[in-house]
Amino acid sequence: MKPHPHRQKPNTVTFQLPTYHDFWNPNLRGLHQSEREAYQLIVEFIEQEQMSTADKQNFLRAVEVLSGAVHAEGNGNMNDYYPKATLAKKIETLILEESTEILDSSVRQQAMLCVVALSQVNPPFHLSEILDLVSAGISSVFSLPLIMPSLDRRESASLYLQMTQALDDMLQALVMDNMDPNMLILENFLEIILPWLTQSDKVHEQTRALGTISRLLRFVCNFPTLLHMELFSMTGKLIGILGLFCLNPNHEISLGASEALHYLSKILVLQRSVRQKTVNILRNLQKNFRGEWFTSMQNVTLFFRKYLTPVERADVIMVTMEGMTSTSRDDIYAASNMLEMILKYSIPEIGKVPEIIQYIYFHMNSITETTAQKTIKKTLYLLSQSYTDEVILTLFKIEDQSQKEVCKPWEILASFPKGCEVIMKHLLQRLVPQQPPQDREPSQRAEISPLIATRAIHELLLESSEQMEVQTLFSPLFVALLLRASFLMVAGNAEMTQDQQHVTEWVDPVSSTVKALKTLMLSSGYGNLESEIEKLGGWELLVDPERHYDGVTVVARSLVMKNCWHNRPIFGLLMRMLQDPNCTNHFTALVFLMELLQCPDVAAIVDDFVTHILANWFNCKEPATVKLLLQMTEVFTKHKNLERRLHILQPQVLNCCYSSNGDIVMETFLVLKHLVEDLTWQYSSSFLIQLTFMLEPFFEEIYGSLLAKVKRRVLVFPLRHQILNVIVFLVLHLQDVNLDVAQTCQVALCNTAALLRWSKLREVFTKEDVFTITGALLQQETNKALWFLKQCVALFKSTQVPIRQAAVWFAGQILQTLDLEEMNEMEEAYAALRHMKRDPDPMVSCLATQTIHVLEAKEKLLLAKPPTSCFCRRRPQRGHF
């Protein structure tokens, strides 16, 4: 058989209209006399339009006889004698001509049995022929008035039973495709029968339809093989309809629906269950055969979860929702109960979610019964939890295409606080798309974009009446929306997807994100905070490409100023995010953190782990990020808990002194200056000591501030050693061409003298010139002469002439204090001094030459001087590096 040309089904058998032979001269020699007479009778009556009941019965009997003859031939073909299609059309006409007001003849049943006989011979019926015959038979039988068995109507009742049996025989014969039932043909039969059940208001018509379906399903379930079962698309719809009629207040209808549902369930068990479990399941089904409505609902629930496909489950839901729009209270009650039961537990996988949501959206207002309203709202809520993306995309698509709002789905979703929280958490995941694992297969389900997720969050926040529920999600929502706004500022239109094509200006996504952020604050009870940010211009700054990060700072500072309870949770989320070295929004997070760390509650919870995360970001290649981290380091001086952990950042900060980026180096020195001004020795002594060693090559005002910070009672040897190791740098930079540097060095020398209790030198440092100071210093600290000489030699390379001149002069003074043995050990210093004879500045060159002559003269005197007695007093030992 071949499908109807208008019905497109894959893998179906195709039908061809028969090509007929020459029917005017068929070969009748192989037929018996009775069969030839039957043929002649067919030819005689086929064209007649007005036929008596007797003629109709004779014609039908003749067709049966000829069909029997063709069937007996084995490979016989009815078209060899008379076109089968013409016979089928004539039989259909005879059925339709029968009165639907009264049952007074056996023509109907005889015609349907005749169809059975024709179905047994070739060629097979065309699908359209089958459906025309079935439609005629169903219409003719179901339209008859109710026939109750009684003594005076015994004949009519008997005829009706025979006719019903003939209809069943015809349906069973036509549903077969060779030796097995064809489920696609059955689907077509059901489409003809079901309107008599669902659209009729007559109990006897509904009962006939249910009985016919039940007996047809009982016939089908006897076959182990069902053709095209995988393409049978009526299962969900049929279960839904039968389930609803199981709840019908009419006992006969309820019983008929229960029987039909039983046989449909049996088909599903036989076709879809594991063979080992089939026997037990069928036994349980048989126990509950013709059970009460509650038992039927249990079966519906069981099969809904275990035996139906996602699309079939969707069909069940659609049928129940259609029932809730009925004008009958009984139908509404049945639909509500059934939908409530099948969705009572965790929802299984459902198909056609967009279709379900569209139906809910457009029919919500037409469902007025209280229980039905609750059920339909719960359905929307459950679907939104399991299929958040599909639900939200569908709602926005409907709203964007509709001229006016039909219902308020966001209000419905927000009315379930716990469910709304689940949806919000899902939307949070969509705000920050994650790269799927490489081994995961691509999902066939729709996924919303971050922009759609932002819009959905905004809609839900507008409708949310539970402030406490919103507050539980405030921190993650706040962080996600803020970072989303920053990401859009950088990405612009780069990530526009198909569902964002309506956005015409690149700033629109940013504006919508900021709008959602404002709504979040208002919904969480932070209206005063939102107003404060508005007053400070923070919202405008956030959408300004040039000053976006200023906006981030304003928002963060406002949270600190208002002592927002969520500051600590927000801090925790940002730090967790920064653990990922590939975090794309790290700069926004750091900008926000710099303000957040100034909140005492936040500063109090900073630990070593958190500080190490910040320290790791110093390895970032972006100069702006490093400069921001340097500035953040200053915040660590404003809270004792932070200051205790400054040593963790110390290596990274000091390493920035050697950066190849001049801006970073400059920023580092500014930060160090502020650090030594703000730090306390109690918590940061190791940092300050380390800083003195680091700053020797970078001689600036930081050193003076550092010395002013140190107290003598806590002075330790490493720091004293370092001070003396750079004292000459301080003295000779009094000659610096930059007066600010010279002045700073003088202050540093005074602090040094106070620190080391050099009371005499302190006065000298304050009033005298460089040459007087170096002489006084050498006189008081004679045993440190070699240290001083080392520093002088280092300054021979200074770019400033006054400093080189002072260094050469002081080196000569030091060398004159050495004995012969010490002078011999200072060959490197002599070599450096001789090199200075070639200095480009004539004054420095001349001074170096004169110093060398003086030293050579002294060396000759020392060589000519007789050796001293072994009992004479030994020269004090010099200090060495």
Image (cartoon, rainbow, N blue to C red):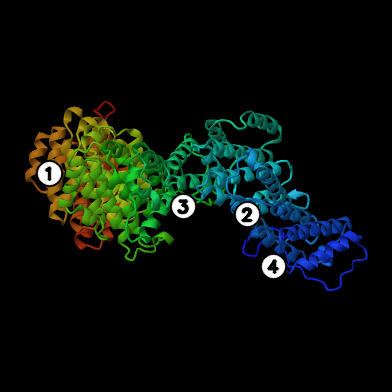
Image quarter for residue 865? top left
Circle nearer the viewer, 1 or 3: 3
Chain-order first, disc 4 or disc 3: 4
Residue situated in front as seen by the camera: 729 or 572: 572
Q: Indicate left or right for 317 with 143 as reference.
A: left
The three-letter code of the residue at mark 4 reads Glu
Q: Is residue 698 visible?
A: no
Q: Residue 682's spot in the image, x, y percent?
A: 21, 30
| Marks 4/3: CA–CA distance | 52 Å
Residue at x 52% of width, y 49% of height: 200
Residue at x 76% of width, y 58% of height: 60
- The 10 Å Cα crowd at callout 4, few under 14, some 14 to 19, many 20 or more, is few
Quick check: 615 above or below 853?
above
Q: Residue 539's spot in the image, x, y percent?
A: 22, 53
Q: Which residue is mark 1?
A: 747
Q: Which mark is residue 49?
A: 4
Residue situated in front as seen by the camera: 706 or 639: 639
Residue situated in front as seen by the camera: 836 or 695: 695
Q: Which mark is residue 140?
A: 2
Image quarter for residue 799? bottom left
Residue at x 21% of width, y 63% of height: 842
Residue at disc 2, secondary structure? helix
Chain-order first, disc 3 or disc 2: 2
Q: Residue 447's spot in the image, x, y percent?
A: 46, 52
The three-letter code of the residue at mark 1 reads Val
Residue at disc 1, secondary structure? helix
Q: Which residue is mark 3?
A: 354
Quick check: 476 above or below 107?
above
Residue at the outermost top position: 871
Q: Residue 118's spot in the image, x, y percent?
A: 77, 57
